[in-house]
Amino acid sequence: MTTRILSGVRPTGNIHLGNYLGAIQNWVSMSHNIDEHLFCIVDQHALTTAEDASDLYNHTRLIAAAYVACGIDPDKSYIFAQSHVPGHTELAWYFNCITPLGWLNRMTQFKDKAGKNKEHANLGLYAYPVLMAADILLYKATHVPVGEDQKQHVELARDIAHAFNNFVKCDVFTLPEPVIPEQNARIMSLRDGTKKMSKSDISDYSRIHLLDDEDTLAIKIRKAKTDMDPIPDSKEGLVDRPEAKNLIGIYAAVSNQTVDAICTTFEGQTFSALKATLTDALIEHLRPIREKLTLLLDDKSELDRILARGADRANELAAISLNEVRSSLNLYPRPKGQ
Ligand code: AQP
């Protein structure tokens, strides 16, 4: 059986360190052991939380360029925009017709994102886990790398695959596996260690953008919230210290050390010493990414080439799945032209 990765990022803002360490870096390392890799810019999902659509074009280019700058080889993997493959929304409709409302009512992200104002939340936000199931199953993805917060949605995709197979009495879909990174599953906000780093946080100081220049990055780390206690001698001492744990976790990720090793080096010191070292390490780690990202953003024809190549392959795979799906549903086949 062909193994296939499918994952994506919503073009909802400036791509940040959490997206890179928690998602894209993991995609790059997984790709080495998987036959085919599809990385999508999920622009239709972005519309579920957009106040307006004015930034969608630029954010889509940014995410596509960031995939490549963060290490995805656009000639070995396929990078494409969700809206370039109409099969996603077609399959989502078939799934809408077999997904019980009760399953969607259990999705915690809808509760978090809609908040108390459920009456005004849009239908797309409520139904987006079904579109996500279509994103995954359209390509018969076997491996779906996601952050912890998305695990529930991949489990829903498995339930939908199962329900569809039962409905058509045929094994059209295989069940995808969620892959959650062991480390960096959740990089937290620099302003509040209990909230995840997020594109939509109103404070720019809550996150490191991959395009931040070195001075901005240094200011953000200097201003990052910490507590008054010294650095402990081991990771056990970081329990109930979310900001401290987050900064040391970020340093561990970008310097390729364990949290325990960092605690041993900095034991008893204040966070200002660690912040200076972390700033240097982050600058070194992110510099090649920022440089590549900047170059690609200036090269529209290369970005278009990458997205066209990805969309061609994605549409090819989608056509195969949709033929199978339509036929299993006994939809009347489109007559050939006379
Ligand atoms: N802080 C994070 N730590 C680790 N992983 C993260 N991811 C996002 N934030 C963190 C992972 O990045 C992938 C793509 O996420 P997304 O942009 O599609 O959706 P999101 O999780 O909603 O990301 P944001 O940045 O928080 O966007 P907004 O503010 O628009 O909602 C996913 O695998 C996600 O887990």
Image (spheres, rainbow, N blue to C red):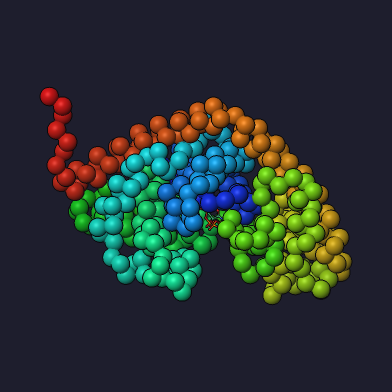
Residue 76 can be seen, yes or no: no
- Which quadrant of the rendered structure holds the C terminus? top left
Number of marks in picture:
0
Closer to the camera in the image, 200 or 70: 200
- Which quadrant of the rendered structure holds the N terminus? top left
Task: Judge whether 316 appears above or below 131 on screen.
Answer: above
Residue at (17% x, 36% y) in the render: 334
Task: Judge whether 159 appears above or below 338 on screen.
Answer: below
In the rendered image, residue 242, in percent from the top left (x then y), is placed at 69, 69
In the rendered image, residue 64, in percent from the top left (x then y), is placed at 54, 39
Residue 152 can be seen, yes or no: yes
Residue at (79% x, 55% y) in the render: 219
Residue farthest to the left, as pictured: 338
In the rendered image, residue 74, in percent from the top left (x then y), is placed at 54, 33
Residue at (32% x, 51% y) in the render: 92
Closer to the camera in the image, 160 or 174: 160
Task: Judge whether 58 appears above or below 240 on screen.
Answer: above
Task: Judge whether 181 appears above or below 63 on screen.
Answer: below
Residue at (58% x, 38% y) in the render: 65
In the rendered image, residue 113, in percent from the top left (x then y), is placed at 48, 65
> In which quadrant of this rendering is ligand 1 seen?
bottom right
